[in-house]
Amino acid sequence: MNFNKKLAVAVSGAVLLMAGQVALADSATDIVDALVMKGVLTEEEGRLITKGHTSKTNVTPILKEKDNNFTIESPNGNNSISLTGRIHFDARAYEDNFGSDVAAGTTVTSSPSATAADTFDIRRARLGVKYKFAKNYSGEIVFNTVGAVNVLDVAFMDVSWFEKAKFRIGQFKMPYSLEQLTSSNNIDFVERSFVDSYIPAKEIGAQVFGEPTKGMTYALAVSNGLPAANAVGSEADNRQDGKDVIGRLSFNAAEAAGNKEDVYHAGVAFAYGDSPIGTGLGGNRSTEARGASFYTTPVLSQNGTNSKTIERLRYGVEGAIASGPFKIQGQYSITSQDFSFGGTSLPVSNYDLDIKTYYVQALWTLTGEKWADRYKAGAFGALKPKVDFDSDKFTGGAWEIGARYSKFDASDFNISALSANNDSTTAVAYGISTKAAGYAEADAYTVGVKFVANPNFRVMADYVYTDFKNMISAVSINGKAIDSENALLVRTQIMF
């Protein structure tokens, strides 16, 4: 019997002999393997039949699913692409306390003002692509559709030629803050703390990073020193075009010891560089709840005898202790700015002034999910419920509660030479184009609850009370002075 006739008999026989066993076979390869096992075909004949099919299989992309997200991957795993996205829908309501003991004075906000207005808001709406090719090259491109300043959120490539020394180039999160390195999809409260306003976040640059030993991470980056949203983060001042050097080192003692139940995380970070005079000394400050703008930073005049740059050093420490469903986390960061300024009415003087920010927070996952399961490479990831929420039975999902205290302290800038207390009618004569105003200190207290239905959907609600202190000049909203703020924040988010 020639081979073609033999194959026809074999296939016909397979239908009869294996109706009960092979009817569920999901590929031609499975059927041929079964025929070889039953002796209908020889191994050589089986290889000849499946040769063409196998070659096609080796180049056919594989569709994989994880956390309800799909990835297209090559059979050898060296190439892949997946779509990512997030929508954060917020509702914010405010009640500002009008202090009877605060005299009307210099206002920080305009009148009438949208500041601290009760509102619905699309906080984030992003769409992106994660990719990998040729095994050692990967990255992500994300576009932010909210806001008109900059639509590019991140765009970077990782080169993994060396396991313990990988390279990253593009626009990405700088290696400084545990809170910032935690995705906005996974942060512990609706908004990050005061610390996040004074650290290098997403900037354009290059980085080397890795995990030299179990539990330890390091990263060293060089960047333009400008936020990505600032003229897309490119260098814009050739008088000061030096780069910021940024570094972070973290260690999880529990992971190093093979403890999979706990997290004992500690980290240190620094960022050093120069910033142009006209950019201000640290930036204006609003409450964590995105409400009242309570502090206006001084801006030095770019004319006269001022320094043409501000020497800026930022350094911080961070820690997190987690056991099972409980976590305590904190950070402390200082922004030190060294500069000189003066004018026709004020002798040139040197200044070294600091802005201090810190927070401490505690969280409890009521449904028992462990924090150690969310920790990877020096940061925390997503809370994944033990059992996803079932909308038919109204069971499942994960619940978590938390509290945070956060501090902003720019009291160094409440000096007559820099502030609205300077009674000069011509600020430029004192080397200042904008005076410091508002409150130099603030304490924020947050309590929150979150419900995570599944890896793609969560709802959060926070109450935030902010107390303003160390007044330079009164802060007003629509003509009325305030000395504190109450805010209720609710976020509904979907991510994939």
Image (spheres, rainbow, N blue to C red):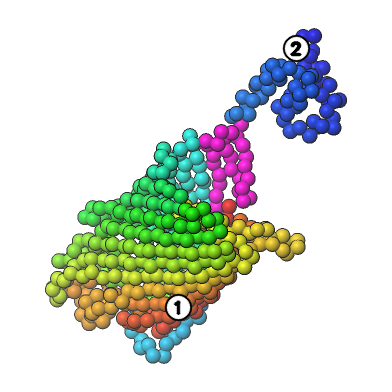
Q: Is residue 1 left or right of residue 142?
A: right
Residue in front for this viewpoint, 474 or 214: 214
Q: Residue furthest right?
A: 16
- Spatial CA distance of label 2 from label 1 is 84 Å
Which mark is on residue 4?
none
Residue 446 visible to an observer of this rendering: yes
Looking at the picture, how far across and down is residue 115, in whole percent?
45, 74
Q: Residue furthest bottom?
A: 100
In the rendered image, the quadrant that contains the N terminus is top right
Mark 2 neighbour class, 10 Å CA radius: few under 14, some 14 to 19, many 20 or more: few
Query: What is the quadrant of residue 336 in the picture?
Result: bottom left
Mark nearest the camera among 2 and 1 is 2
* Highlighted magenta segment, given as a residue range: 60-86
Disc 1 marks which residue?
A: 466
Residue at 58% across, 40% down: 72
- Amino acid at circle 2: Phe
Q: Is residue 30 left or right of residue 457?
A: right
Looking at the picture, how far across and down is residue 226, in whole percent?
33, 57
Residue in front for this viewpoint, 33 or 296: 33
Looking at the picture, how far across and down is residue 383, in whole percent?
58, 59
The answer to whether residue 353 is above or below residue 146 is below
Residue at 83% across, 21% down: 12
Residue at 57% across, 38% down: 73
Q: Is residue 9 left or right of residue 473?
A: right
Residue in front for this viewpoint, 478 or 458: 458
Looking at the picture, how far across and down is residue 473, in whole percent?
32, 82
Disc 2 marks which residue?
A: 3
Residue 71 magenta: yes
Query: What is the quadrant of residue 395 in the picture?
Result: bottom right
